[in-house]
Amino acid sequence: MLEHVELFFKSIFIDNMVFATFLGMCSYLAVSKKVTTAVGLGAAVIFVLAVTVPLNWLLDQYLLKDGALAWLGPEYADYNLSFLSFILFIATIATMVQLVEIVVEKFSPALYNSLGIFLPLIAVNCAILGGSLFMQAREIPTLGLAFNYGLSSGIGWFLAILAIAAIREKIRYSNVPPPLRGLGITFIITGLMAIGFMSFGGMLTGGDEAAPAPETTTVQQTEKEKTKLEKETEENAVSYNTIIKE
Amino acid sequence: MALLSKKDANLILDPLADNNPITIQVLGICSALAITAELKASIVMALSVVFVLGLGNVVISMMRNIIPSKIRIIVQLVVVAALVIIVDQVLKAFAYELSKTLAVFVGLIITNCIIMGRFEAFALGNGVWRSFLDGIGNAAGYGLILIIVGFFRELLGSGTLLGFQVLGDPIAKTGLYSIGYENNGFMLLSPMALIVVGLLIWVQRSRNKDLIEEN
């Protein structure tokens, strides 16, 4: 449970898709002029990431990883198809986006209308493929965690685009130097926000209690040695004193 | 030039400055920012994109009359993914250390918006040779920004270029360091890439007033 909570906050704040790894920048810059459209795209990204990351996790575990084909029989055990992961991941994403679009249109026309044209655009959003590739690179161990990772990365992206859209709506009333207007100032604001988000970096470092266990034992040992030494020196001092007295 | 007519030459030269994919068209930002802390990584990334976009444009342009327009996105994705796999495998074989630094960002060339953008906007409607030039030009414009950003970040951040200490030795206090210069470690952090690109845009748009946006 704790690892779920940790991964959740880590992918929203510390490894934020936009501010830490710059994924999905294109749509982040293009669709952040108004808050309402930003919310639509953000919601679609959360949705698609939460669907495709676990799906690609299954593909990675049972098809692509080194030795992943062992379930077919021992003669397949040393196949390593990981070089195919790019093409398979992107194909999964493209088909899933299509499928999600059809399903959402059928069962929830209201949601479909609010997401509008953003759903098909998402297939080529780097945040989606990036989510799957980072999932593979970080070797996320279980399906549940993979789902959690997709969902929370999506939420992080949503948060970022919402924030920049709100700022851009306000900045229209400010006097920005003409060459910086539009794109330039957006870049610089995003840079400053990214610096702000870096301060979350220390948020979860206090949590690993299990790791430093051997260290404490060594510390105790050294402390024991220290006390021993002190005792010895005291004894020595005492003996010296006695010698001097004598 | 005899090899290139003026129109063809413009296909290459335009994206380098006034129609730059990154600073004007706002495409392909993701990878531009994440890997530019070192000049070497920027150059390799630029070359990979030149390869993928040049060849991809040629392939798509050759197939443009037989791709049904309804499934063109997935055809394009498959073509890019195949080319990117080649780049990735070559990098892993010949420059393993570098492919570790670039990590997932090689894979993310697939979703680099420049590539899909050029396929859609150019290769689907133009001949093979022109598409090839367009691909090379746009990828070079992208690479140019990458290399400029990488140059400044590595020079100011760690005082080196391609790993050589061009400003002197910070520990032995030679060269610039002897008069009290210090490396700005901040430049190595990822947010600075955004700010450097922002400043580049500022410089470019002050020089060419036509590019200034309304808002």
Image: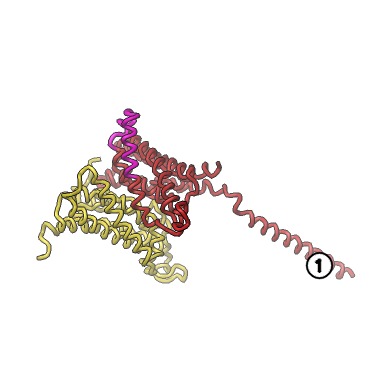
Chain colours: A red, B yellow
The residue wearing badge 1 is: A236
Can you say whether A108 is above or below A153 in the image?
above
Disc 1: host chain? A
Q: Quadrant of the C terminus of chain B?
A: top left
Q: Nearer the viewer, residue B110 or B1?
A: B110
Can you give x and y, in whole percent of width and height, for residue B37 in the image?
38, 58
Can you give x and y, in whole percent of width and height, for residue A157 in the image?
39, 42
Q: Is residue A102 left or right of residue B62?
A: right
Can you say whether B205 is above or below A152 in the image?
below
Q: Is residue A125 visible?
A: yes
Q: Is residue B33 left or right of residue B61?
A: right
**Residue B42 is one of the magenta-drawn residues:** no
Q: Nearer the viewer, residue A162 or B101?
A: B101
Q: Is residue B1 left or right of residue B170?
A: left
Residue B164 picture quarter:
bottom left
Range of residues picked out in magenta: A93-117
Residue at horizontal 83%, vertical 69%?
A240
Q: Quadrant of the N terminus of chain B?
A: bottom left
